[in-house]
Amino acid sequence: MSLLKKLAGETVLYGLSSILPRVLNFVIMTPYFTNGKMSTEEFGVFNDLYSTLAMVSIVVTFRMETAFFRYGKDPAQADRAFTTSSFLVAALTALFLVLSLVFIQPIATGLKYEGQAYLIAIVLGILSFEALSAVPFARLRFANRPLRFLFLKVLNVLFIIGFTLFFLDICPWLEQKPGWAWLQNLHFHGSPESDAFLANLIASGLTCLQLLPQFLRVKWQIDWPLLRQMTLYAWPLVIAGVAGTVNQQIGTPLLKYLSSMSQVGLFNGASKIAVLLNLFTTAFNYAAEPFFFRNADRGDAKAMYGQVAQAFTLVSCLAIGGILLGLDLVVAARFVGPEFTKGFGIVPIMLLANLFLGLFYSFSIWYKLADRTNVGGTLAIIGSLISIGLNVWLIPQIGYYAPAWAALACYAYMAVASYLSGQKHYPIAYPIKRMAWYMGLTAIAYTLSQVVRNFLIKNGIPAQLDQLNLLEKWPILAVNLLLLIALLAALAYIERNLLKRFLKRSK
């Protein structure tokens, strides 16, 4: 139990730092961008290029973060593992940057940004800084220094927000005053997405400078045999990482090519609601991966892994229930602009997809511990084929709903396949039946909410999701509150023994 508490504490700390940018994008930047600052098309451009950046960054970093966890756990070679992995990332970054700048015009045309090569150049700069920061951040995680990790990530977020507001609001205001016209040379005009990328570029550069002391404190030595071992270990993870990122991001560029940039904006605007669960999933993965490696030699490790998966499912179902039963409040608070709320039908699908993604993270630990990383690559590639195939087939028919259904099918397959293969090669006793109860009760609560909502609308009682006046739609709010209380009570009853032990210890 103490180890689970430690993992929970690290999940909170790493969650705050690793996914805080997404939290702030939802709480601050998403309302800021979607309530008049950007159109659906401009918001589509903003998210499309970030999706491309996410897919490419896996190749450039070559999953040296995980390779460092694997080979840096021996204190005798921790520094060599750090410098060797950092060297490879720096070399790949330099090579990719040079080649991309040489062919930047064809790249821009291929990505449907002809005449906007400057956007590609800015994104390349962001990619370079973030790649160089990857292994130093991994070292902070492995050294169990979440507070330092948190500080640097929060600082990066504050830089992004500060420079975005400076370029989009402060500069235009000051430029109207005598003597301040020179500010026009510092940013883009009439292109809010370009200014947003520029703000991220500056923030990433400043964060990279903050990590520079890590490179200066060690004796630099490139261990070529170790580099070969790390590369052989990491390349299946690179394939799995690329495939996994494709699974997460491919819907955005495919919408761009097969539909329109406005559809891209609608999909990503609605998907920001599902980020509330995705951020927890990401935090769990950040904390769990080094946690699993550090405790792999314990006699009770397998039992602990089962408890971790159960706890993740319980907390995720609570989060899903709270989000779905509270969507009316999200709409009324204008967390996403009115122009984007028409896409909220994909929210339940994306939430369930993210739950299966988190289960995949938990079930997949077996092949990392057993050095069978090729299994992860195989599962992720098949998942990518499912995702790409469904998107290509469904986008012309159902538009932005297609990436949501494709993500759900992909992650459900990967979670189930990882579980079944793990039971064959590295059996862990996961409490599947209890986890299924959590998911089933959450689904029942949401289904009842939708039945009541449709009944109220049919009888002329305001209950539409895009109805902003909360006083007029109090019946559905009351029903959702009662359903949420009932869900909490049902889950508490299922885990009554655990709850009794917790309450007894807290006295």
Image (cartoon, helix red, strand yellow):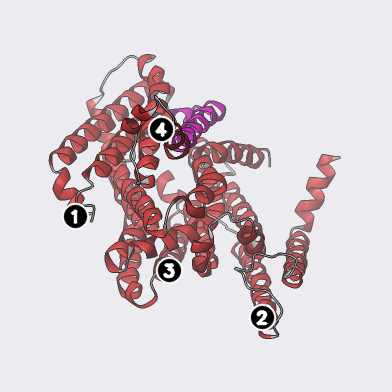
Pair 1/3: label in front: 1
> Number of labelled discs?
4
| Structural distance between the alpha carbons of marks 1 and 4 | 36 Å
Which secondary structure, mark 3? helix
Q: For residue 409, which numbered disc appears in the image?
A: 3
Q: Amino acid type of disc 1?
A: Gly
What are the residue bounds of the magenta stretch? Answer: 139-166
Q: Amino acid at mark 3?
A: Ala
- Name the residue that disc number 1 marks: 110
Work out how far the residue at label 4 is from the one at label 3, CA to CA, in angstroms: 50 Å
Q: Mark 1 and mark 3: span between their CA atoms? A: 29 Å
Residue 432 sits above or below residue 307 on the image: below
Q: Name the residue that disc number 2 marks.
A: 457
Query: Which residue is labeled 4 in the image?
Result: 175
CB under 8 Å between discs 1 and 4: no
Q: Which secondary structure, mark 1?
A: helix
Q: Earlier in the sequence, mark 2 or mark 4?
A: 4
For the residues labelled 2 and 4, the Cα–Cα distance comes to 50 Å
In this picture, is 114 found above or below 292? below
For discs 4 and 3, the disc positioned in front in the rendered view: 4
